Amino acid sequence: MLSETISLYIDLQEGQKADLEAVARASLAFADAIREIAGFIDPFSDTRIELISTTEGSISLNTKIKFRAAGRTYEITLYALLLVFASYITVHVGEFVFEKATTVVWEQLFGEQEAALSDEDKEDIVSRAVKAIEAKAGERQIQRLYAELNEDPAVIGVGVSKEPGVCPSNIVPRNEFAKRSGITRLEEPAEKKAS
């Protein structure tokens, strides 16, 4: 079973602690998203997500995704899974062309590993990732993750890193959580002033 680490980084206000229940629900949404994306990319795959450690301060949920694919494409499938998940967290996919979103995330996620992959493998990974994003695999779960984190005022941002405990270079700020969760708030009508 091939495995790869990925950390969900939850940025907290200085001196604040996260709400356990909000982080627990967000963690479940994180795991559900990984499983749905993996199932879309390879319906015969088996995915196990293990919490290997946490990092205090801002919270980094350091996980290892163990993945067993049906064919010999397990590495390509796992990379596509990571690319889709990180694309949903890192960029607001709805505002990007899918290929551009995956290119931005690719550089952040696989920079040093890129040399080991053939051009054909890279194209296959991006193709699978784009199909999963177009099918919205995992999107609902990522929206739930944002909604849960939005409930905790101590959380000021979220991101994804492949290195446990490392603050990602791209953190989604709290002011984008409602939009990314699909929550729309109705504006209160302006009060009429008596003249």
Image (spheres, rainbow, N blue to C red):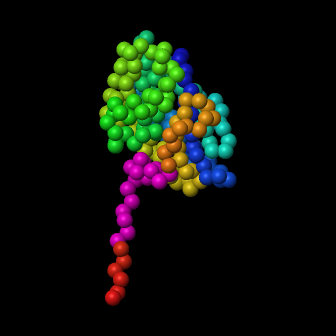
Q: Nearer the viewer, residue 50 or 11?
A: 11
Residue 75 as seen in the image, left or right of residue 8: left
Task: Please check the rendered image and state whether residue 180 is part of the magenta-colored stretch, yes or no.
Answer: yes
Residue 29 position within the rendered picture, expressed as x and y whole percent measured from the top left:
49, 40
Name the image quarter holding residue 128.
top left
User: Is residue 140 visible to the viewer in this orientation of the structure?
Assistant: no
Residue 6 position within the rendered picture, expressed as x and y whole percent measured from the top left:
55, 30
User: Is residue 115 visible to the viewer in this orientation of the structure?
Assistant: yes
- In the rendered view, tell whether residue 144 sits above or below residue 191: above
Residue 99 position within the rendered picture, expressed as x and y whole percent measured from the top left:
34, 31
Residue 51 position within the rendered picture, expressed as x and y whole percent measured from the top left:
61, 32
Task: Please check the rendered image and state whether residue 100 is part of the magenta-colored stretch, yes or no.
Answer: no
Residue placed at 52% from the left, 54% from the top? 151
Q: Which residues are magenta?
A: 174-189
Residue placed at 55% from the left, 33% from the top? 161
Residue 108 as seen in the image, left or right of residue 20: left
- In the rendered view, tell whether residue 157 sits above or below residue 114: below
Name the image quarter holding residue 88.
top left
Q: Nearer the viewer, residue 192 or 116?
A: 116
Residue placed at 49% from the left, 29% from the top? 109
Q: Which part of the image, by quadrant, shows the C terminus?
A: bottom left
